[in-house]
Every structure is written in structure tokens, then in C-alpha cells.
Image (cartoon, helix red, strand yellow):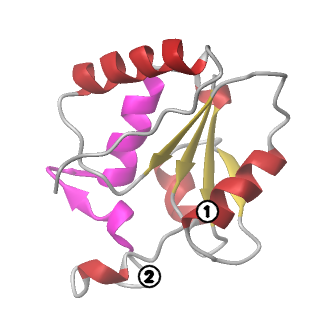
Amino acid sequence: MKIIILAGGKGTRLWPMSRKTSPKQFLKLNNKTLFKKTLERCLLLEKPENIFVSTNKDYSFLVQKEFKNANLIIEPFSKNTGPAILYALKKLNLKNNELVLVCPSDHFITPDSEFVKSINKAKEIAKSNHIVTFGIKP
């Protein structure tokens, strides 16, 4: 499985905590950024070489600060979630029927064990040629 972490958003809805130079995925919450927490969850599922971070050139240094030798996919321009996912998928050399997990980097998810359990369940469903999406009640 390949994992794409989306980390290119500006996080403008969390203003004034979040700024263009410090979007919400790079704000610290309990001594770790939301991006770092997302990365740690993803590392419970896959090796670093199977984890890719989609971001823009302005945030690439923030990604590399927390994920040394990150597999970066630099978006040519910011156009929201859908285009970022499509661009990342085009950049990956996916094998036939290879599973892909797309994770936003600005969500607080706990506990990690439930996340892993849910993803493993989703992988089984996806192997039957289904698309699986996750959501929560607001």
C-alpha cells in the first residue's frame, strides 16, 4: 500500500492561530504538530519509502523538518484537495490494483490503535475493488 499525506493546505479557517507561513497542519498540539501525528500514524501502517507527502514548495521545508528524506510530491499550484490527490496519484508509479491511502495532515485522530484497526478493515474491503472513505460526525 502507498500512503499520500496531504500537507499543502493553507489552513485559513483556523485564523488567527494558523497563518500562510504556519498552516494548521504544522501547528503544535501537545508538543507535536498535526503533520507529525499523521506521519506517526502512517508509519504504523507502512515503511517510510511507501509514504509520500503532497505539499507546495512553500511548505516543503516544514515537511522535511519533521520527516527527514520525505518522498515529496510538490504541487505545481494549490487547487484544493481533489487536484492535489489527482496530481499525487499521477506522480506515483502504482502497480495494478495497488491500494492507496490518502490522509489529510490536519486532523486530530485518537487512539492510534483504532485508526490502524479501521485502516486494516478498509484494506480488506478495498481489495474487493471498492473505494472506502472515512468520515466523522461533526
Please name the residue shown 37% across and 45% down the image: 36
Element type where label 2 sits in the image: loop
Q: Is residue 11 above or below residue 105?
A: below
Give the position of the N terminus as an image quadrant.
Answer: top right
Q: Which residue is mark 2?
A: 21
Majority secondary structure in the magenta region: helix
Instruction: Give the residue displayed 38% in from the left and 42% down from the top.
Output: 38
In the picture, residue 47 is in which quadrant? top right
Residue 26 lies, in percent from the top left, at 37, 63
Residue ID at (40%, 15%)? 121
Instruction: Please tell me whether residue 37 belongs to the stretch shown in magenta.
Output: yes
Label located before the other in sequence (2 or 1): 2
Left or right, 137 with reference to 25? left
| Quadrant in the picture for the C terminus | bottom left
Q: Secondary structure at mark 1?
A: helix
Q: Which mark is residue 82?
A: 1
Q: Are marks 2 and 1 in contact (CB under 8 Å)?
A: no
> Percent position (x, y) of residue 105?
41, 52
Where does the magenta region start and end? 23-43
